[in-house]
Image (cartoon, helix red, strand yellow):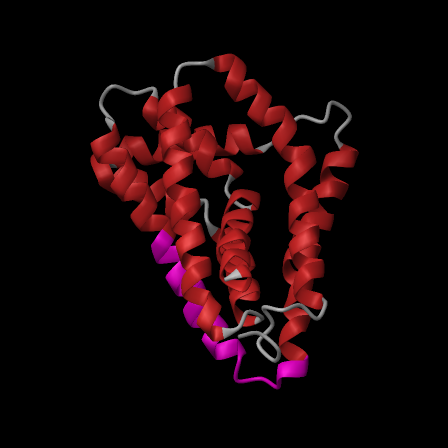
Amino acid sequence: MAAVSLGVGLGLVTFAATSLDNLLILLGFSADPAYPPRVVRPAYVGSVLLVALAAAGLAALARLAPNRHVGLLGWIPLGMGLFQLVRLARRRDRAIEAAPRADRALRETLRIRRGRAAVAGVTLAASGDSLAAFAALFADTSTGLVPWALLGVGAGATTWSLIAGRLAGRPRVRRLVERVGPALLPLILIGIGLYILLDTPTDVAGGP
């Protein structure tokens, strides 16, 4: 049971660490009366799960390599986290670049489509880092725990959409996310990378 909880937790944490852009995009959608929760929520959660399932497929291919090499995939989220920290340190004002990127992606997508297609399009376009981190995590996680990690990802996406719905139209909260997220999330990615590199109870070789 502890390992199952760990699997769900890993999915949740990895989702949160790679989905800051998505939260900002969701805040934008939720502030638009043309995008009620019944439109945004299923399209967003479904798109995130599609990315997670694609990552699980890539992880299955990665497991064809010897087990001793699979853990080296931890360098992917570790490298992503280190890169984000270096980029953050080089920005004198510590401001996040995710907000302008998210706003541009949102405006461009709304220009060419509306409704659930717009939500799905923006979400998938902003999910490249999620795909890489999920694939590395799932490849190093015992096969029996991957469905639980997927459940954690789905729970995280649902929570993100609920939070965005409640916080839409509150610029002070958005500014807080834009300032705190860049400092916190790279550290979480580094932690995930180290977790994959180390021998842990959920590893392919030693997990349940």
Can you say whether 187 is above or below 111 in the image?
Answer: below
Q: From this viewpoint, which residue is outermost toward the front?
A: 1
Residue 96 can be seen in this image: no
Residue 91: x and y in percent read 74, 30
The residues colored magenta run: 49-68
- Total labels drawn: 0
Can you say whether 87 is above or below 148 in the image?
Answer: above
Residue 66: x and y in percent read 62, 86
**Residue 158 drawn in magenta:** no
Residue located at (51% from left, 34% from top): 101
Residue located at (28% from left, 34% from top): 40
Residue 97: x and y in percent read 60, 32
Residue 117 can be seen in this image: yes
The answer to which quarter of the image holds residue 192 is: bottom right
**Residue 56 drawn in magenta:** yes
Can you say whether 55 is above or below 121 in the image?
Answer: below
Residue located at (22% from left, 34% from top): 39
The answer to which quarter of the image holds residue 106 is: top left
Residue located at (61% from left, 32% from top): 181
Can you say whether 175 is above or below 72 in the image?
Answer: above
Tell me which secondary structure the magenta stretch mostly adopts: helix
Q: Foreground residue, 89 or 196?
A: 196
Residue 45: x and y in percent read 33, 45
The answer to which quarter of the image holds residue 105 is: top left
